[in-house]
Amino acid sequence: MKNEKSGKEPKEIVESSPNGSLFGEFFEGSKFKKYGRFVFAALGSIPWVGGLMAASSALHAETEQNKKNLLVGQWINEHSEKIISLQATLENIANRLDQFGDEIEKRLQDETYLSLVRQGFRAWDEANTETKRSYVAKCLTNAAATKICSDDIVRMFLDWIKKYDEAHFQVIKALYHNKGATRAYIWDEIHGEDVREDSAEADLFKLLIFDLNTGHVLRQIREKNAQGQFLAKRRSSKTGKRSVLQSAFEDTKPYELTELGAQFVHYVMDETVTRIEDNPG
């Protein structure tokens, strides 16, 4: 009984790793020494993995009845795409971290980092797109390989990945590449089509900006003094009232990512950032 997407039989998936065990490539020799705790933390945070391993053992047991093996195989088949994706994610992180040599081994054994791994793979398991899963992988890779952001900030970044939707990330990307963009410019970058102010699209766009603004991911550009303090806006002396409310696609007020928002892009949407030894601060 093949999985339509992967083209593999359930038993093929179970036996795709050495010794016929799932994720077996991480549990041999130097791989186990370096990544064992990392992999255990990742797998232990995903509820269905334990049941999957038990099911794979039942599938291999010679004394099990064929009918029961068929049911177990069907259950494994339902999870086959996620199994393949999980294996690929673990391998991708390990391959990227291998580029940094032995200097990150201490980090991979650090319980503080392993708590990030558990949080990250819970978010990975709940993600509904491959893009969000790739963001989790990049975040955990960069958190292991760099010291640019504190672990508290990385923990918040993982929360953002879980909390925000693809539409939020499109706004973040548009603003990252176009600092000072207005709402109208951001909308044109993402959609490029005019819509009515009372449309569902306009309501959604306002909600995206509101979410990211209250979440301290983006803000309107404001004047600052030499100490980096934001200056209060001067109140207008005009007493005239506007006849209509401000447009969802307002085109005079420039926006920018906050420092947290910019670090989020650098950590989660870019490739691996500065190595550990290159950034002692």
Image (cartoon, helix red, strand yellow):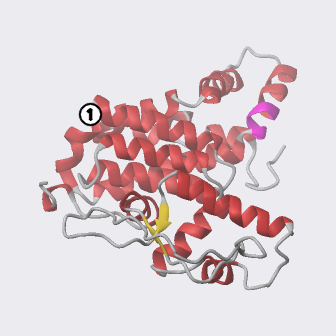
**Residue appearing at x 37%, y 56% in the figure:** 95
**Residue appearing at x 43%, y 30% in the figure:** 40
**What predominant SS class does the magenta segment belong to?**
helix
Q: Can you identify the residue that label 1 sits on?
A: 109
Q: Is residue 27 visible?
A: no
Q: Residue 190's spot in the image, x, y percent?
A: 67, 78
Q: Is residue 123 above or below residue 217?
A: above
Q: Is residue 201 left or right of residue 256?
A: right
Q: Is residue 226 visible?
A: yes
Q: Residue 129's spot in the image, x, y percent?
A: 67, 55
Q: Which picture quadrant has residue 21?
A: top right
Q: Nearer the viewer, residue 20 or 137?
A: 137
Q: Amino acid at mark 1?
A: Gln
Q: Is residue 179 left or right of residue 276?
A: right
Q: Nearer the viewer, residue 126 or 75?
A: 126
Q: Residue 265's spot in the image, x, y percent?
A: 44, 64
Q: Is residue 6 above or below residue 150?
A: below
Which quarter of the figure is the C terminus placed in? bottom left
The verdict on residue 140 being magenta is no
Which quarter of the figure is the N terminus placed in? top right
Q: Which residues are magenta?
A: 74-78
Q: Is residue 51 left or right of residue 30?
A: right
